[in-house]
Image (spheres, rainbow, N blue to C red):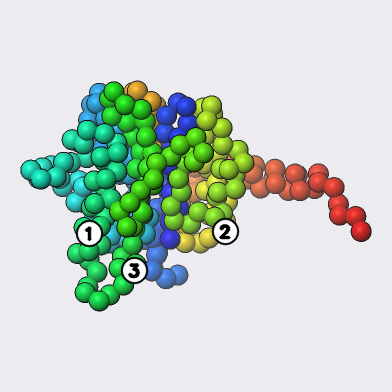
Amino acid sequence: MTYCVGLKINKGLVFMSDTRTNAGVDNVSTFRKMRCWTKADERVMVLLSAGNLATTQAVVSLLDERTKAPDERTLSMLETPSMYQAARLVGDTVKEVIRQSAPVGQNADAFGASFVLGGQIRGMEPRLFLIYPEGNFIEAGEDTPFFQIGETKYGKPILVRAYDPAMSFEETIKLLLVSFDSTLKSNLSVGLPLDLLFYERDSFRIGYEKRIDQDDAYFRTISDGWSSALKTAFKSLPDFSR
């Protein structure tokens, strides 16, 4: 299991992902689930992945390979004319990998993977997409300003309640850390370290990137502070009257 979030604010895009993968309680590994493609002063693209690890790694490797050895028939992530076409490329690659991975007669669901793709190409607005295992996708908008993949249910309430498009990057990172902290405490299959990245609109470069581990002082402050704030808020609510 995993947990990844891509979130769109007025200032740009913010991404966060955990790194835990496991095939049982005694087989836990750490893998990066965030991949970036950049072309100086022209484009930045960030891809988050969740699902079957072999599928997600094959998709990312194939997309990466095409940027280094372009196929005449297929544009690479560094060549697509729009973010929409980049989302189509990821979707087509997902379908290709799953089709090749699933033996004839076997349920392809076991090889499923989903992705969040966000970024900006010069001359266009920043865009954010959720790409399904079937290869189709939807785009973030005013009504849906963020996408989650993996273990989404524990971290969603705080995002829904506290999100504001006018938030600063610092506030957005705080919001995401609270969302991830809630998920980490509720599901052992999601774990540290966390990968964080934010992109400022029209900058065409990665604004900030960091790996957050269990010894990170700010994360510990957020985790402890959120727990205390919840207890205080609960105690401040009126008791039930019969």
Provide residue 187's location: percent of width, then percent of height. 53, 60
SS for tag 1?
helix
Q: Residue furthest bottom?
A: 105
Residue on which the image places disc 1? 97
Q: What element carries label 2?
A: helix
**Of pointers 1 and 2, the one earlier in the residue sequence:** 1
Residue at screen point 64% across, 42% down: 225
Viewport quadrant of the N terminus:
bottom left
- Disc marking residue 186: 2
Q: How crowded is mark 1: few (under 14 residues within 10 Å), some or many (20 or more)?
A: some
Disc 3 designates what residue?
110
Horizontal side of 107 relative to 151 (left or right) equals left
Q: Nearer the viewer, residue 4 or 117?
A: 117
User: Neighbour class for label 3 at 10 Å: few (<14), some, many (≥20)?
Assistant: few
Q: Which residue is drawn at 45% across and 45% down?
A: 147
Q: What residue type is labelled 3?
A: Ala
Please give left or right for residue 151 compared with residue 49 in the image.
right
Q: Which amino acid does label 2 sit on?
A: Ser
29 and 203: which one is in front?
Answer: 203
